[in-house]
Amino acid sequence: MSASTVSVIVFFSALMIVVSFVIGVWSSRKAKTAQAYFGGTAMFGPVAVGLSSMAGIASAFALVGVPGIIYATGNPMTFWMLSGAAFAMSYIILGKKVRAMAEIAPISSLGDICDVRFNNNRIIKALMSVIICLGCVGYLAAQIAAGSALIAHLLGWEPIVAGLVVFGLLTIYTAVSGEVGGLLTQAFQGFVMVIAGVFMIYAFFKVTGGFGNVMQAVGSIPEITGANGVTKKLGPDLLNAWGTFPGKISLTWMLIPILGCLGQPQVLVRMYALKDPRDLPKAGLVTAITHTIVGFLAVVVAYGALYLVATGKIPPLEKADMAIYAFADYVGIEAQLLVYAAVLAAAMSSASLFLTSSSTLLSKDLSSALGFNIPKEKQVSVSRIFMFVLGGASIVISIYSTQMVALLGTFGWGTLVSATFPVFVIGLLWERANEAGVMCGITASFVLNILSLTSFVWPGGLPAYFNISAISIAITVVVSLITPRQEISANLKRVIDL
Amino acid sequence: MNLSKLKTVIVVFIAALWLACMYLGWQNDFIPAMCLGVALMLLHMILGAAKNGVISKKLLVYPFGLWALLWIVSFICSKYYSDLFAGVMPSFTILGFHPSFAFTIWFYWIGGMFTLSLGFHLYKDEWLSEKDWKDFVNQVQKEAK
């Protein structure tokens, strides 16, 4: 890449970071109360909520890892990435109930909902906070590692310096403005990703001439070896629906992301950030359309890279994760500056969301579950301190301990599903769900998640999180049924019946 | 349709369906498992959309019913065409896609996304009308007094 190209990309990326910083600092004026700071509760319209939800979900993994997996193994990952239906589904299932909880009690965190639903049960809240926090910190570390590596590669800096500059600024504006600034900056970053998506989809059709040409090029040769000595397996089966993985992987990558979208903190917390719950269908449309563009971006760059390799225009990739960059480099400078900015935007939007979520969980929910009650007027200051410490520690750990990042990375999407379904999904859909049931379900989730970090091998070859989600949900339901029914308040019943 | 007395049965079905999907996944019987996965999602949506235990028949038919149909057809056709053209170049494409993957694109992705998102928007009153919300807020405020 030429020096002038790098300068343009760096300028564009820096501009995006500066605009994010300005939005974050500006919006701190709106974060006046604890409820606004922690939850942005009932403050936003459907466009901001829709865009920020999409940006929170579409992490750096979606833009870099997903094209890499599609390039390497074919289409099973598209079940995950083309999941635009998931948002409307999530809002239909829980949207009005989560938003209604904010009417019957002051809600600013997931722990608050847990308290109202399960009579301030400290064990449920503590276990839920720990599991969600593990998932959030895992995501956070992965975003920092990806974003820092990108900037370090562009500028020739040490990754720690790149991490401290980019994510240090992010930590500052997030700590100052809380969830209010987080939501607005994520909406802006989501917009950057959409612009990049539109351009790259156009570029894909211009370069390849369409999917028929990709099918022809990839399907007509079994493999290709480049001058770099790398061999890429191709052939028609790579582009059928299931690719090179067994079908059970398509099952997992369909069910867990679609239904599991409902269990992601970045979707749950946005449900109560909306001013009017009747705007949720509109937010669902915004999220679905923008996610469709960004999801399709991930697919077309993978298909584009496959086409370029199959036609000999570029050598087979040494690392599949380079698919998006390889295609952007081939397209030219406009694609490069948009793609690099979009990857950075994806890393920053998810990082800020997981930073606020994990610091709120640690400083507010877990601390109160453990009996440390921080006075209301001090909660925001304590959370800010947590955010600085957590942000700094995550930057250092994610750069220096790749093993730790890999370990935390396993606590991702599926782990969050196994922690949130018993408490929020079963809890808010079924009044018969009781403390005993949810406590057993969430304990099973906690123990099995920890067990999965050992050498224990699950039968059947499904990812651990699939088994853990199924088992913890089943335990929650069975134990709730065989233990005495618990009375719930009239207001809570109204929420469940709404 | 009144589901008040069926709620517990539906939740038990949900738990059973999770376990069934897991077991079928272990056996790599992924098409039946994916179809059961659609049933699992449908039951969640029915519980979530029901108001005072009553689910609107309109919602049940469109978008929920149509969405479920699109997805089940998508999975079955994807499997049919992947088996039909296993190891060989397909004799035709659907708008450029491998016929197996075309069903993922047009039915699972575009069809599923627009059916649910637009249907939800069009029939939002069946999910939560302005009156439902106002009544709810009034009752909560009354209780607070």
Image: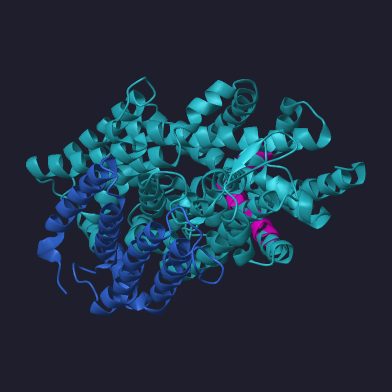
Q: Residue at x 59, y 28 (%)?
A: A394
Q: Quadrant of the C terminus of chain A?
A: bottom left
Residue B22 lies in magenta, yes or no?
no
Which residues are the magenta region? A170-196
Q: Is residue A178 magenta?
A: yes
Q: Nearer the viewer, residue A223 or A491?
A: A223
Front residue of this view, candidates A202 and B82: B82
**Farthest-out residue, right:** A4
Q: Chain B's colour?
A: blue
In the image, A23: left or right of A221?
right
Return the residue nearer the eye: B46 or B135. B46
Q: Quadrant of the N terminus of chain A?
A: top right
Q: Position of residue A51 (x, y in %)?
A: 57, 60
Residue at the spot 59% in from the left edge and 21% down from the top edge: A401
Q: Quadrant of residue B111?
A: bottom left
Residue A394, compared with residue B118, is above or below; it is: above
In this view, the residue in front, A76 or A81, is A76
**Chief SS of the magenta region:** helix
Is A64 left, or right, of B117 in this rendering?
right
Residue A168 is at least partly visible in this image: no
Residue A475 screen position, x and y as percent? 19, 39
Asked which quadrant contains residue A473, the reply is: top left
